[in-house]
């Protein structure tokens, strides 16, 4: 993969995350973190609505099916572990419910939000 391909993929990912953030905000979520990282993994978006935290993976691909297939079990595990770290860093959120959501963005910029796309172990 050339440096230009890597740059284009990065830009598409950032654009998809921006689109997903705007969508979540329109649904009443507050975006708490974008591109959150800790030693255990990375979470694209962490959003809060009332007493609920959504740990959101954003996938942009040519089609929604391609995007859905890109959320691999190994990645799900790293997101769950990163979420555990986030919650440990933010004990005030301990009483909130949580979900692992996925937002799929197709080339046409259509967005599909899948709440509770996967679960904690």
Image (spheres, rainbow, N blue to C red):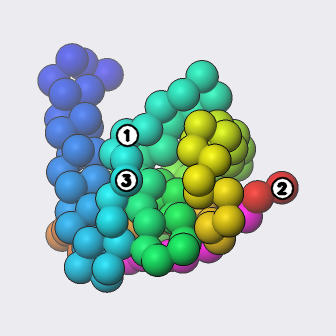
In the image, residue 111 sits, relative to residue 46, either above or below, namely below
Q: Residues within 10 Å of mark 1 (few under 14, many from 20)?
A: few
Q: Residue furthest right?
A: 121
- Spatial CA distance of label 2 from label 3 is 24 Å
Q: Residues within 10 Å of mark 3 (few under 14, many from 20)?
A: few
Q: Which residue is mark 2?
A: 121
- Which mark is first along the chain, 3 or 2? 3
Q: Which residue is mark 1?
A: 35
For numbered disc 2, what is the local secondary structure? loop
Which one is in front, 25 or 59? 25
Q: Residue furthest front?
A: 92
Is 115 one of the magenta-colored residues? yes
- Say which residue appears at 64% left-offset and 29% top-offset: 40
In the image, residue 86 sits, relative to residue 106, either above or below, namely above
Which one is in front, 102 or 47? 47
Mark closer to the observer (2, 3): 3
Give the x, y percent position of residue 53.
53, 65
Give the x, y percent position of residue 34.
34, 45
- Which mark is first along the chain, 2 or 1? 1
* Highlighted range, magenta: 111-119
- Say which residue appears at 27% left-offset and 62% top-offset: 21
Task: Specify the quadrant of the image occupied by residue 116.
Answer: bottom right
State the quadrant of the C terminus: bottom right
Mark closer to the observer (3, 1): 3
Q: Which mark is residue 105?
A: none
Give the x, y percent position of residue 108.
18, 69
Give the x, y percent position of residue 61.
34, 56
Horizontally, residue 107 falls left or right of residue 66, namely left
Q: Residue furthest top?
A: 3
Q: Which residue is mark 3?
A: 32
For numbered disc 3, what is the local secondary structure? strand
Q: Are marks 1 and 2 in contact (CB under 8 Å)?
A: no
């Amino acid at each position: 993969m050339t440096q230009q391909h890597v740059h284009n993929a990065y830009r598409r990912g950032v654009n998809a995350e921006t689109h997903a953030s705007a969508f979540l905000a329109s649904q009443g979520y507050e975006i708490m973190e974008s591109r959150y990282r800790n030693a255990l993994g990375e979470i694209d978006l962490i959003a809060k609505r009332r007493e609920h935290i959504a740990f959101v993976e954003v996938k942009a691909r040519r089609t929604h099916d391609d995007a859905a297939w890109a959320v691999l079990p190994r990645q799900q595990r790293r997101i769950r572990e990163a979420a555990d770290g986030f919650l440990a860093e933010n004990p005030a959120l301990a009483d909130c419910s949580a979900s692992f959501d996925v937002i799929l963005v197709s080339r046409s910029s259509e967005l599909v939000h899948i709440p509770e796309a996967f679960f904690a172990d």
